Image (spheres, grey):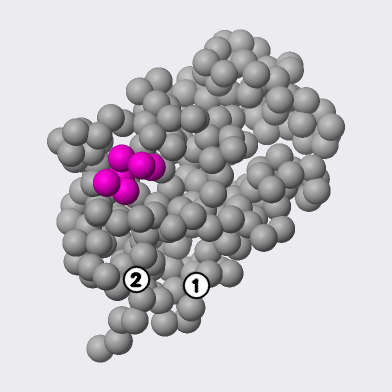
């Protein structure tokens, strides 16, 4: 049996990671560190309130780790000339994955907040991170995303503002992994964030969203810049979930 020296619970200001962190602290006590990789700059300001509420709930200070190379996600976009691709988003790699790698040790046990709805992501996670020793307490306990919402409410913690606005995740405002429906919702709720990303797309000549159709019996797909995105494009409620963390995907 492996000897546990340090447990790292990775908190992302979402309610699933909050519940996973609570379970990890309850199970491992003083051995457990709860850690947040700092992307506050482009998250909703209410995340700082949620962060503080979760600290009180779990009875543990959440450690904040920052990138040693990049100031924020737009610094990543500017310097790497990269937004998003098949492998995910460069901002998540630099602001979260690499921050984790800089802090972790080979004998750490990692706790992640995948829910019981996301079992399909664990196999991919283990394939892409074979060196990590990891636990998924939400899956082990059959806790779904809806359950996490309910658990946080029962703890008398108000859900983060992005959930209350109808978003499925509490990522940065204007996540590069979002689809057309998501971006049209951002256009309405956060027009400044929409315009900022639209300008970044043009600067890098890289479009986030796609549109597709059929012409003369042939299906086609093409990228579309945000400043040309039809206002009725996409349906956010049926778009794939957008993970911002250990997988950084849209599967």
Does 2 lie within the magenta span?
Answer: no
* Image point (42%, 82%), residue name: 107
Q: Secondary structure at mark 1?
A: loop
Q: Local crowd at mark 1 within 10 Å, few (<14), some, or many (≥20)?
A: some
Tell me the CA gap for discs 2 and 1.
Answer: 10 Å
Would residue 86 be seen by someone viewing this image from the given angle? no
Residue at position x 17%, y 56% in the image: 141
Q: Which mark is residue 7?
A: 2
Under circle 2, the secondary element is strand
Mark 2 residue crowding within 10 angstroms, few (<14) / some (14–19) / many (20+)? many
- As drawn, is 221 to the left or to the right of 17? right
Quadrant of the image for the N terminus?
bottom left
Q: Nearer the viewer, residue 5 or 142?
A: 5
Residue visible at 27% across and 70% down in the picture: 30
Q: Of helix, strand and loop, which mostly describes the magenta segment?
A: helix
Whether the residues at callouts 2 and 1 have beta carbons within 8 Å, the answer is no
140 w.r.t. 151: above or below: below
Name the mark on residue 11: none
- Looking at the rendering, the stretch of residues picked out in magenta corresponds to 51-56
Q: Quadrant of residue 150?
A: top left
Whole-percent x, y for residue 96 in the image? 55, 55
Q: Residue at x 73, y 16 (%)?
A: 228
Q: Residue 236 at x, y = what percent?
A: 47, 23
Report x, y in % for residue 71.
Answer: 69, 48
Number of numbered discs overlaid on the protein picture: 2
Q: Is residue 57 above or below residue 149?
A: below
Residue 104 disc label:
1
Q: Position of residue 238 (x, y in %)?
A: 42, 27
Location of residue 213 (image quadrant)? top right
Q: Is residue 233 left or right of residue 130?
A: right
Q: Residue furthest left?
A: 154
User: Between disc 2 and disc 1, whose residue precedes?
Assistant: 2
């Amino acid at each position: 049996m492996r000897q546990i020296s340090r447990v790292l619970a990775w908190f992302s200001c979402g309610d699933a990671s909050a519940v996973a962190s609570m379970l990890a602290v309850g199970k491992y006590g003083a051995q457990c560190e709860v850690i947040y990789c700092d992307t506050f700059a482009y998250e909703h300001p209410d995340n700082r309130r949620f962060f503080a509420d979760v600290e009180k709930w779990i009875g543990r200070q959440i450690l904040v780790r920052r990138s040693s190379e990049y100031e924020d996600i737009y610094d990543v976009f500017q310097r790497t000339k990269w937004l998003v691709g098949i492998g995910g988003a460069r901002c998540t790699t630099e602001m979260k994955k690499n921050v984790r790698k800089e802090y972790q040790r080979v004998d750490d046990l990692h706790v992640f907040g995948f829910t019981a709805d996301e079992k399909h992501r664990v196999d991919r996670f283990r394939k892409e991170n074979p060196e990590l020793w990891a636990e998924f307490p939400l899956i082990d306990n059959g806790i779904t995303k809806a359950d996490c919402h309910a658990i946080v409410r029962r703890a008398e913690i108000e859900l983060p503002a992005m959930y209350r606005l109808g978003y499925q995740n509490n990522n940065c405002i204007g996540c590069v992994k979002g689809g057309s429906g998501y971006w049209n919702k951002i256009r309405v709720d956060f027009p400044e964030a929409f315009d900022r990303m639209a300008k970044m797309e043009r600067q890098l000549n890289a479009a986030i969203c796609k549109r597709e159709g059929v012409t003369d019996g042939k299906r086609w797909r093409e990228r579309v810049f945000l400043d040309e995105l039809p206002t009725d494009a996409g349906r956010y409620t049926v778009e794939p979930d957008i993970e911002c963390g250990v997988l950084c995907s849209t599967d």
